[in-house]
Image (tube, rainbow, N blue to C red):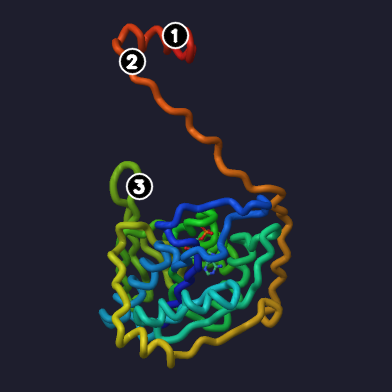
C-alpha cells in the first residue's frame, strides 16, 4: 500500500505575521518558514501506518516555489521515502487557491496511484480548510476529514476514521483509495534526528511543472489589498457591578 502525503510550506506558527509595507500580502522575506503543523501530523500518521506494516511506501508532495523543497526535505528527514515537488512561483496578487492545489494533487495522485492520500485539515496561512475535500471530490474518492484516529484494513482495503464531532466521536468506514485530513489530536509528530536529516539529503525529489501535469491553475481571484486588523482599544477597570450595568446599558447599549 502506498500513501501520498500533501505538505505545505507556511510562515512558522510562532512568527508574528506582518503585512508588507505595500499591502500586497503577508511579509515572507527573512521570515522563518516551516511545514504546516497539520501536514506534520499527516506525515507522522503515514509513517506510523508504514511502521505498523499497513503501508509500504510514503511519498510526500508539495506545490510551491523552489524553497518548498526544504519542506519536502523535512518530510524526508522525518522518514518519508521520496517526494514530488510541483514547482509554482506564486504571485501575491494571484495566490494559488485550494481548487488549483487540489487539481494538481489529483494529477499527482493519478500518476502515483496511492491507496490513501493524507492532508492536513487546514493550512495555517490561508485557513481555507478546503483542499482535502476538493481533492476527494475531484478524484471521486471517499473522504474522512478531521481524523483523530485512523485504522487501515489492508486485506479488506478499508480505512476506519474517527472524527471528533460536537456530541462525541464519530466513526466512519471508507473504501480505499480514500482521502483523509488530519486533526490536531491524531498524533504528536516526531522530530527529525540528525542521522535522518543527513539520510534525507540523498532521497529523491521529483520536480514537475504544473503544465506537465496538464492542469490549468489560473486563479480567478485577485487580492486587491491586505491590511492589519484594527488595533484593540485598551480595557478599563470598573469599580462596581452597577457601573458595569450602567456602561452596558448606556454606552454599549447591549442591555
Ligand atoms: P487548505 O485547504 O489551504 O487549508 O489546506 C489544507 C491542506 O491541503 C494542507 O494541510 C496541505 O496538506 C494541503 N495543501 C494545501 N496547499 C498545499 C500546497 N501548496 N502544497 C501541498 N499541499 C497543500
Helix, strand or loop under label 3: strand
The answer for how far apart the CA atoms under marks 2 and 3 are is 39 Å
Q: Classify 242 as above or below 17.
A: above
Disc 1 designates what residue?
249
- Res 47 quadrant in image: bottom left
**Disc number placed over residue 4 in the picture, else none:** none
Picture residue at 66% right of the left edge, 80% below the top: 209
Name the spot of residue 206 as percent of width and height, x first: 55, 87
Please determine whether, in this image, residue 97 is positioned above or below residue 248. below
The outermost residue toward the left is 52
Which mark is on residue 165? Answer: 3
Describe the element under mark 1 as helix, strand or loop: helix
Q: Position of residue 131 (x, y in %)?
A: 54, 61
Which of the two discs, 1 and 3, labels the residue nearer the N terminus? 3
Task: Work out whether residue 105 or residue 18 is closer to the camera in this orientation and state it.
Answer: 18
Q: Residues within 10 Å of mark 2 (few under 14, many from 20)?
A: few
Closer to the eye: label 1 or 3: 1
* Residue beneath disc 2: 238
The answer to whether residue 166 is left or right of residue 12 is left
Mark 3 residue crowding within 10 angstroms, few (<14) / some (14–19) / many (20+):
few
Q: Does residue 155 appear in the picture of this structure?
A: no
61 w.r.t. 162: above or below: below
Along the line of sight, which residue is nearer the eye, 34 or 183? Answer: 34
Amino acid at each position: 500500500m502506498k500513501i501520498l502525503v500533501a505538505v505545505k510550506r507556511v510562515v512558522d506558527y510562532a512568527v508574528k505575521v506582518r503585512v508588507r509595507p505595500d499591502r500586497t500580502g503577508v511579509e515572507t522575506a527573512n521570515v522563518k518558514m516551516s511545514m504546516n503543523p497539520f501536514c506534520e501530523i499527516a506525515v507522522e500518521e503515514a509513517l506510523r501506518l508504514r511502521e505498523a506494516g499497513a503501508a509500504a511506501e510514503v511519498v510526500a508532495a508539495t506545490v510551491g516555489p523552489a524553497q518548498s523543497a526544504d519542506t519536502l526535505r523535512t518530510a524526508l528527514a522525518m522518514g518519508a521515502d521520496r517526494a514530488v515537488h510541483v514547482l509554482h512561483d506564486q504571485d501575491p496578487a494571484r495566490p494559488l487557491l485550494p481548487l488549483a492545489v487540489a487539481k494538481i494533487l489529483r494529477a499527482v495522485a493519478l500518476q502515483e496511484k496511492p491507496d490513501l492520500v493524507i492532508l492536513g485539515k487546514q493550512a495555517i496561512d490561508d485557513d481555507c480548510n478546503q483542499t482535502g475535500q476538493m481533492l476527494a471530490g475531484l478524484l471521486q474518492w471517499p473522504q474522512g476529514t478531521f481524523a483523530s484516529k485512523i485504522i487501515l484494513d489492508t486485506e479488506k482495503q478499508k480505512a476506519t476514521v474517527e472524527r471528533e464531532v460536537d456530541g462525541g466521536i464519530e466513526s466512519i468506514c471508507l473504501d480505499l483509495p480514500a482521502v483523509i485530513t488530519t486533526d490536531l489530536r491524531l498524533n504528536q509528530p516526531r522530530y527529525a534526528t540528525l542521522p535522518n536529516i543527513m539520510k534525507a539529503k540523498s532521497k529523491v525529489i521529483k520536480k514537475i511543472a504544473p503544465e506537465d501535469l496538464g492542469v490549468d491553475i489560473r486563479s480567478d481571484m485577485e487580492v486587491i489589498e491586505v491590511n492589519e486588523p484594527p488595533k484593540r482599544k485598551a480595557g478599563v477597570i470598573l469599580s462596581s457591578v452597577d457601573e458595569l450595568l450602567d456602561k452596558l446599558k448606556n454606552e454599549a447599549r447591549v442591555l
